Image (tube, rainbow, N blue to C red):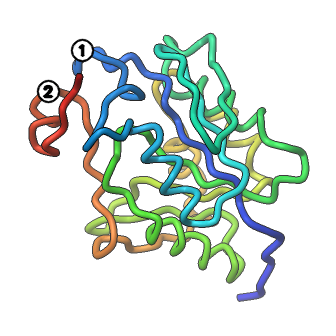
Amino acid sequence: METRHAGAPAGLLLAAGEGRRLGTPKALVEIGGVRLTDRGVRMLHEAGCTPIVVVTGAARVDVAGAVVVYNPGWRTGMGSSLRAGLSALAPDCPAVVIALVDQPNVSAEAVLRLRAAYDAGARVAVATYEGRPRNPVLIAREHFAEVAEYAEGDVGAREFLRARPDIVVSVPCDDVADPRDIDTPEDLRRFDIDPA
């Protein structure tokens, strides 16, 4: 495969939801005194993503080391947050790694594996666990507009990935990351997280 690397990808952390089932916006939840938002930004930074954009909504938060973009349409679902984040990226941004704030055990190593696939020529790379696509996802700039078209309601990049299997490179990450997310107080207890 031809190498077509054109610089480091940006990082995009989606953190706009209200956490209805959780009872508090996920962006504010802490693990060991560190907000999930800061944890996600640190993970993307450690993987060399630059710049890093955080999309907020239900809770407006300042985040060191990131550009914060407020999504006024956050109530409509993840799709509007993904569109807001993509539109905030500079025109010369070659690619973006999309991560979700509520997956605290997704690692920088998983992102580095996506970047390695990108460096080898992949234009869309998705982390897989037990063979199933999850997050994070890397998407090259030429697909941003198409991704945005598919991003509606509570759907992010998933429908785009399903519609374009011919360009998606699967990157196994079972041994370096855990894609489980935090949706409920039970999930918080599983992760030993204090929601306060």
Indicate which disc, 1 or 2, sits on the residue closer to the N terminus.
1
- Residue 96 percent location from the top left of the image: 67, 53
If the image is split into quadrants, where does the N terminus sit? bottom right
If the image is split into quadrants, where does the C terminus sit? top left
Amino acid on which disc 1 is placed: Gly
Q: Which mark is residue 185?
A: 2
Amino acid on which disc 2 is placed: Pro
In the picture, measured across the screen, residue 98 lies left or right of residue 59, that is: right
- Residue 174 percent location from the top left of the image: 29, 71
**Spatial separation of the CA atoms under disc 1 and disc 2:** 8 Å
> Which secondary structure lies at badge 2?
helix
Name the quadrant containing residue 74.
top right
| Residue drawn at the location 38% of the way across and 26% of the way down | 28
Determine crowd level at label 1: few under 14, some 14-19, many 20+ residues with C-alpha closer than 10 A: few
Identify whether 133 is placed above or below 52.
below
Confirm or deny contact between disc 1 and disc 2 (CB under 8 A): yes
In this view, the residue farthest toward the front is 33
| Residue drawn at the location 13% of the way across and 43% of the way down | 192
Identify whether 55 is placed above or below 96.
above
| Residue underneath mark 1 | 23
- Residue 8 percent location from the top left of the image: 74, 66
In the picture, measured across the screen, residue 142 lies left or right of residue 111, that is: right
Name the quadrant containing residue 69.
top right
> Which secondary structure lies at badge 1?
loop
Residue 6 visible in rendering: yes
